Image (tube, rainbow, N blue to C red):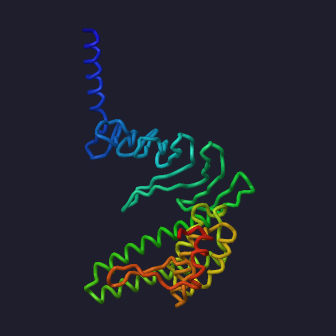
Amino acid sequence: MRSLSLWLIAIIVFSSCSKHLNRMNKHGQRTGKWIVYMDNEHKIKSFEGKFRNGRSVGKTFYYTNKGVLDRKEIARGKKLKATFYYANGVVKARGNARVDNLSDKIHYYYYGKWSSYNEKGELEKYEYYNKGKYVRSVYVDKNNQMNDSLMFALNALEVEFNDHRNRWLDSISKHSNNPVKKAEYKQTYAQADSITFSQIDQILCTYGYPSSAVAGEAYITPFYLLSFAPTALKEKHYHLLQSAVNKGILSPKSFAFFADKHRIAKGQKQLYGTQSYYDKDKKEIFYPSEDPDNLQQRRKSIGLEE
């Protein structure tokens, strides 16, 4: 009987507390304590924090879609002390952020000095921001070769390239029955491509081909962008890519596809037999290869299956 009473009391307390969660004031602003869950069973948290007149106060916690803590913020007016975490709970980065309520959007950005850590919790570098714009990095290990400015530039180029490529190709497709509109979108698409290829050309001329030690995972971006570039630009940096293969930066297998596409575009025979097309009967036809008797040997030497 006593256990039943305690159970009823627990339900009453829980119900009472639940009523005080996720409330809005008379102005439609969040107020008091808020907890948002990813699931209907309320087992995986997405967000937890407190509000006063729609503004975050005190500590706020953000979680991944698996319920793992991703970010913690401590609010002091518009200023925030932010801490990001790895999935193992170790601090990933910490620093200052700010929230400005603009007329058309809420602007959240970093500022000042940020500290970045590896997954062991060891301090790796300091990053500096000015109103959300990355300024520079200072590594604790002076022997570290990483160029964060280059890495960020490459990442931004790839994101912008994929964005305009998807956007304008979609627009071209939608207006396939309107020759005027289609031509306009094709011209805009070509102009956007031209800007991207000019920027990657400048980067390669300035830095050479960057290794992963310098550009992190963004080292593959120049190779990716050049695969879409005009033949003249591919020709200009062809030997630079070959050199990157010799240095172990790029894989010979990846370069083989690039080399074959480039040779076919110039009207030459391919070297590794990677390129093909489909005829009207949907039969796959491979483009002619140079020295076909030794084709399999060349393919095998770079790890391509027979």
Q: 164 or 279, which lies in front?
A: 279
For residue 182, above or below residue 9: below
Image quarter (top left, top right, bottom left or bottom right) of the N terminus:
top left
In the image, is 30 to the left or to the right of 68? left
Residue 98: x and y in percent read 49, 52
Residue 74: x and y in percent read 49, 42
Q: 194 or 208, which lies in front?
A: 208
Q: Residue farthest to the right?
A: 143
Q: How many marks?
A: 0
Q: 189 or 220, which lies in front?
A: 220
Q: Residue farthest to the front?
A: 293
**Rendered image quadrant of residue 262:** bottom right
In the image, is 178 to the left or to the right of 196? left
Judge whether residue 207 can be spotted in this image.
no
Q: Residue farthest to the top?
A: 1
For residue 219, above or below residue 203: above
For residue 154, above or below residue 181: above
Q: Which residue is painted at 63% across and 62% down in the image? A: 212
Residue 10: x and y in percent read 29, 20
Q: Which residue is painted at 52% across and 78% down in the image? A: 273
Residue 270: x and y in percent read 54, 83
For residue 117, above or below residue 219: above
Q: Which residue is painted at 25% across and 43% down in the image? A: 26
Judge whether residue 42 can be spotted in this image.
yes
In the image, is 2 to the left or to the right of 232? left
